[in-house]
Amino acid sequence: MTVLIKTLGFSLALMLIFTVVTYVLPQMKGEAPEDRDVDVAALTMESFISLGEELYLGKGTCTLCHNDLGRAPDLLALNVVNTSLKRIGDPFYQGHAMDAAGYLRESMLDPDVFVVRGFGKKGSDDTESPMSAIDKPPIQLSDVEISAIIAFLQAKDGNPVTVALPAQTPASLVAADEKTEPIKPMLAQNGKEAIAKYACAACHAILDTEAAIGPGLNDVGKRLSIDQIRESVIAPNAVIVEGYPPVMPDLSGTMVVKELELIVRFLAEQTGDQP
Amino acid sequence: MLHRHVNPTPFACPEYGALQDRTIIIRGKQEVSGSRYPLWNWRQVLLVMMVAIIGLSGSGFSSVASAAGQAAAQQITSVNNDVPTDESESSLVPAPKPERSDYPNIGVSSRSLVWVIAQMHLFFGALVLAVPIFVLVIELIGFRTKDDRYDDMAHEFMKISLTAYAITALFGGALTLCLFLFYPDLMTYMTTRVFGAQMLVYATLFFLESLLLYVYYYGWYALRYGNRKWIHLTLGLLLNAVGTTLLVVANSWTTFMMAPSGIDAAGAVVGNIWEVMRGPLWNPLNLHRFIANIAFGGAVVGAYAAFKFLCAKTAAEKAHYDWMGYTSNFIAILAFLPLPFAGYWLMAEIYAYSQQMGILAMGGILAWLFVIQAVLICTILFAGNYYLWSGMARTEGSQRYRWLIKYIAAVLVLGFLVWVTPHNIIFSTDELARLGGSNHSVLGPLGIMPAKNIAVFLMLIFTFLSFQIYRRADKVITVSWERWANALMIAIYIVASMNVIFAGIYYGYFTNTVYKVGSSVMQVGSTLVVIVSGVVIDTFLFKGAKTLPVSWGKISGRSQYALFALPVAFTWLMALMGYVRSSVRTHWHVYAVMKDNSSDNFIPTLKHVGNMVTFTTVLFLMFLLFIFWVANLSGVKQVPGLGLANRAAAEGVA
């Protein structure tokens, strides 16, 4: 009996250790994309761009490969419009696109048309892309969704958006997150506008306000590096300054990349030395 | 106060190497210590490999099975050709598209229930398919060496397998019931439209397996000696061929759901049954599960032997169960060593089939599971190595090699540390400032796949070194060219290790990401060269070698816990990696063809996965104890006036 208890105890303890490891690792849940009707008639270009960003980060699963790990060109780091125009002029380009939007659509529907050197399937000599056509399963984006992603890719670097808003309501349009608001205000053009748009001053002392719910930001550039500022905006609860409540909202679902960078750059310049 | 949080985004996930999951048992006459319980020699190792190949050739039976299915399908097609258009069109019916309301709701999570029952069926299925494989090998060794202890041990293993077989069937029946109850559309599609007649072939094979199993077990003593033994061995061979065929047929269902073939984009069947079965992931999964089953079975039997060793009252019993434990560990580790290669093949095929699926597993939301996998595989390697080092105490000759243990241990610990180092975690601002970024300048690069590969392959090479010095511990080599052979072996170890490190660094850090996988080929090759050349060189070195006495039973009680750690880690690992394999389909029943619209179509959090895996492992452990108890019970007899006694002894009394 003693041996039974000892060996059972040992086995259970070992299993407990394995289980504990699963508890200390990040807890992420992968939700399946939900079908949702979107009123296309109510879409503005801003909300269309915003929808594109959500699709890019969510249902489109673009960031699975298009990231900074080198699996595919990092589209968020590139000026996609300028790069597209260069690719159209590449002697290896086999497609028919005449502009950046056309190139982007073509690359999503038929990724083999132009494979960026070094990113082709193994053994294909960069003639075959590992990317699947995104209008087919498992991603299966609609034409409107593809246009929304193109609009986002154009807008994120401040380029003019050339895709037209969808003219009529499709039967069903899929969005990744049910909670997403369909309509968003205009994109901020500079740091001050972005600070105002997201009402940062409601809680933080910044610009001419003296709010004290969150830490003052007038000298934040002196206290934090640019990466730390960026992290504070993207993951506000990652670090909580002592004495302040963890009440800052998560803006990652609403703020676009361009605005984030405007805010980060603006805050990095706030060293407390300004007149 | 600063709080530490980990990055909840998929971008922060580390990239990890792929290894994976999955089957034995023993007893013989009790003898006192000495070298009467022989060590496994390389000829026996080759026998294991031969039987493995024969077992794998069972897949040839699947060709027959599929050919039968194909013939049936063709017959159906030809019948359909005779009837007008609407009937012909009905053969191209797309896959169903069930809505949320089409999934029956009985108030509990359908997925959780099916998860537990399927996992239990897989655990026992793996055990009952693997045990007859090495039972046949052990029986053959006993026949060739005319040593009845092998034969008795093999028979005892089969006793355990027989009880486990019934439990496997019970869970299989329950699983079928649950699947049809909770996922009617999927099961109707899979059984009636896709696999059709193949399911009948599977059922027939199951009956044949049962028939052969019972005849093989109950005919053991009736067919023990002379030419009759050949009949028994043939039965064993047939049993394994049918068992392996069952395995590969069932695997085709799994791989069809992951990477469907033989159907069109809408899910309508356009190919024959062979085209449906022969998906891109079928053979990699067949190989991986076949090898893993043997490792798993060896580990389970080792726990049985360890338990009996710890309960043993006499030196004879201790010697017997020590030998049994050694044999089990030998089987488990021998099968475990090539498992990563099969795992790499499987992952490479997954990537080739769908980069998105591959990245989801290795660099997306599922990637964190590979941190746990690292902990589990390192537990297996630590336990296996520790048991070998402890076992060296059985012979005085081991003193010549003990100095190497600390270096092997150092490599294993370093390998473990590299393996569990994540690529990217968000730290507090203060920590970030001290690190100079979210990635540590030194530790950050250790978080990616190439570093893991270096760690894994070096750990495998040094585990083989443990194995090799253990094998040499009781030998005094007499050949004149011993020094040259040893120099060659050392050179092979050094060159292989350097190659593993060079390939990992060069391909991992100085080439484009898409070429990183290129390092694996060189690393797998280097590791295999060490293992194969080690086996070959030692085979020749041991010719005419003097064998030192081995004191069976002279091993610490603590070492036996390593034999418990092995099956616990194997079982947990098997459940975990099975979950990963299944989850890469995300919200698809049949990937990119038939969506899962049930309320459980999400990827759960890691702690939920941990809870489920632990629950199934504990449940399996409980059933295993029951099986061991039942197996022992058959050896006990009530004697009037004497109470319970060992049956053999009691019959002697009678």
Image (cartoon, coloured by chain):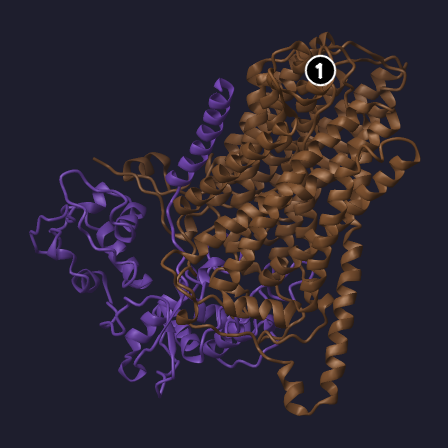
Mark 1 surroundings within 10 Å by alpha-carbon count, few (fewer than 14), some (14 through 19), many (20 or more): few
- Colour-to-chain, purple: A
Q: Is residue A88 left or right of residue A208?
A: right
**Which quadrant of the figure has residue B506?**
top right
Q: Position of residue A125 (x, y in %)?
A: 68, 62
* Residue named by callout 1: B653
Can you say whether B304 is above or below A154 in the image? above
Residue at the outermost bottom position: B84
Q: Please tell me which residue lies in front, B584 or A40.
A: B584
Vertical side of A80 occupied by B236: above or below? above
Query: Which chain, by letter, is brown?
Result: B
Where is residue B265? Give x, y as percent: 59, 75
**Three-letter amino acid code at disc 1?**
Val
Q: Point out the image quarter for the C terminus of chain B.
A: top right
Quadrant for the N terminus of chain B in the image: top left
Q: Number of labelled discs?
A: 1
The extreme front residue here reads B640
Where residue B99 appears, as percent x and y from the top left, is 42, 72
Letter of the chain that mark 1 sits on in the rendering: B
The answer to whether residue B461 is visible is yes
Q: Residue at x 66, y 23 (%)?
A: B325
Residue B16 makes an appearance in the image: no
Q: Residue at x 35, y 88 (%)?
A: A168
Taking depth in this image into account, of B330 and A242 the one nearest to the observer is: B330
Residue B190: % across, % down: 60, 67
